[in-house]
C-alpha cells in the first residue's frame, strides 16, 4: 500500500483539491475521520496541527489527508470531506 490518503482520494472519483500536492502547505486536503476510525490512525504531528489551527471549520477528527499513510489495517477507512474544500462547491 504505502500511499497517502490524499493521493488515493485524488485518483478516485473524489474531487478533493489538495492544491499543494501533499507538501502540508495549504490544508486543502482536510478530511474528518469517521469516529470509529480515529483510534486506528496515528496521531497527527505538531506541524499538521498547526496547519489545521489556521482553518475555521476544524472539528473532532480533523486531519490532513496528505499526512495519513495508508496501511492494510486502515482498509475501509471512512472520512468526510468538509464541503468548503470540495472543488465546485
Image (spheres, rainbow, N blue to C red):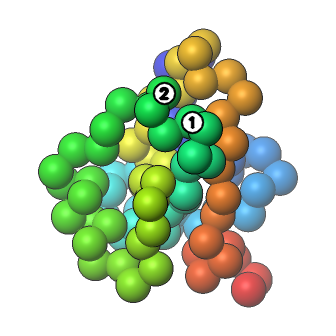
Q: Is residue 39 above or below residue 47?
A: above
Image coordinates of residue 71 in percent, x first then y, are 54, 18
Q: How far apart are the alpha carbons under marks 2 and 1?
A: 5 Å
In the image, 15: left or right of 41? right
- Observer-nearest residue: 63 or 5? 63
Q: Which quadrant of the view contains residue 82?
A: bottom right
Residue 79 x, y percent position in the rendering: 64, 50
- The residue sitting at 83% across, 52% down in the picture is 13
Query: Residue at (32%, 67%) from the top-left corner?
Result: 52
Residue drawn at x 45%, y 68% is: 59
> Are there few (<14), some (14-19), or many (20+) residues within 10 Å of tag 1?
some
* Residue 53 can be seen in this image: yes
As helix, strand or loop, the secondary structure at mark 1 comes to helix
Viewport quadrant of the N terminus: top right
**Quarter assignment of residue 51:** bottom left
Residue lying farthest front? 36
According to the picture, the residue beneath numbered tag 1 turns out to be 37
**In the picture, residue 26 is in which quadrant?**
bottom left
- State left or right for residue 81 relative to residue 45: right
Q: Which of 72/35 is in front?
A: 35
For disc 2, the marked residue is 40
**Above-or-below relation of 42 to 14:** above
User: Which one is in front, 37 or 9?
Assistant: 37
Which percent across, then down, holds residue 65?
49, 49
Residue 17, x across and y down, in percent? 59, 67
The answer to whether residue 7 is visible is no
Amino acid at each position: 500500500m504505502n500511499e497517502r490518503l490524499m493521493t488515493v482520494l485524488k485518483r478516485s472519483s473524489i474531487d478533493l483539491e489538495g492544491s499543494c500536492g501533499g507538501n502540508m502547505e495549504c490544508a486543502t486536503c482536510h478530511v474528518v475521520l469517521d469516529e470509529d476510525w480515529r483510534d486506528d490512525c496515528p496521531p497527527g504531528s505538531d506541524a499538521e496541527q498547526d496547519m489545521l489551527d489556521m482553518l475555521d471549520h476544524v472539528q473532532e477528527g480533523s486531519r490532513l489527508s496528505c499526512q495519513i499513510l495508508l496501511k492494510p489495517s486502515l482498509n475501509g477507512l471512512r472520512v468526510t470531506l468538509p464541503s468548503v474544500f470540495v472543488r465546485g462547491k
